[in-house]
Image: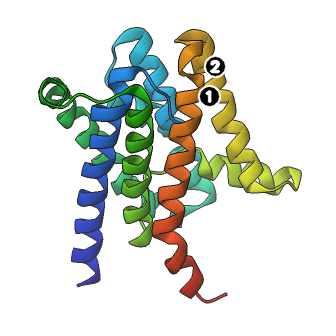
Amino acid sequence: MLFIHRVISILFGSLILSIGINFFIIPFHILDGGVIGLALIVNYLTGYKVGLMIILFSFPIYLLAWFKSRPFFYNSLHGLLISSFFIDIVYPYTYYFHYYIHISPLESSILGGLLVGAGIGIMLRADASTGGLDLLAQFLAKHFSINVGLVIFLFDATIISLGGLLISKNNLILSFITVLSVGIATSLLTWNKEKHEPC
């Protein structure tokens, strides 16, 4: 039963995440943090598929996880592959969504961030994830004895700033709003889980 619940959570979370990215973030060239943000930058500059880029950027991190943290490797591999697959499968429907629904860039950055955060949160509640730079942040935080949250924030800020220089400075604020929305949605969906986990 737990296995079925986990599979459903990964599928549903991946679908919501892919809708947030394709329908709300990509059309306005907004950025997110982490590996998704790097994949979006490459997509905006070259047109390469976001899901494929997420997998390629994640490969070195998963290689590190294989040697340093096998539980992380196994718990997040399925989420990474399925969510990346969904992102590329849903992308062609972006045109139809915006043909019928008109939305402002600000609304899109908020809704996109909330959907991406919700998708991540749903997977985290089932002990799955999309992987990303979180593992690298944990290793760096441990090695340099600094707060992991600070490291993740620095990663996200660097990626968004880089994207602002390469893509559009005008979208910097929208991108930071998106990252904030992702954080809020993820935190709300995982708060009860963290609260009831044994110390």
Q: Which residue is mark 2?
A: 162
Q: Amino acid at mark 2?
A: Leu
Using the rendered view, name the quadrant where residue 5 is placed: bottom left
Asked if marks 1 and 2 touch (Cβ < 8 Å), the reply is yes
Front position in the image: 22 or 77 = 22
In this rendering, would 163 be left or right of 27?
right
Q: x, y (%) of residue 172?
A: 59, 23
In this rendering, would 135 be left or right of 103?
right
Front position in the image: 187 or 148 = 187
Residue pictured at 52% horizontal, 12% vertical: 167
**Which quarter of the rendering shows the C terminus?**
bottom right
Residue pictured at 39% horizontal, 19% vertical: 43
Distance of mark 1 from mark 2, alpha carbons?
Answer: 5 Å
Q: Which residue is mark 1?
A: 159
Q: Taking 52 as reference, is 72 above or below it?
A: below
Q: Taking 169 as reference, is 40 above or below it?
A: below
Using the rendered view, name the quadrant where residue 69 is placed: bottom right
In this rendering, would 21 be left or right of 40?
left
Q: Amino acid at mark 1?
A: Ile
**Which quarter of the rendering shows the N terminus?**
bottom left
Residue pictured at 40% horizontal, 26% vertical: 105
Q: x, y (%) of residue 138?
A: 70, 55
Q: x, y (%) of residue 130?
A: 43, 51
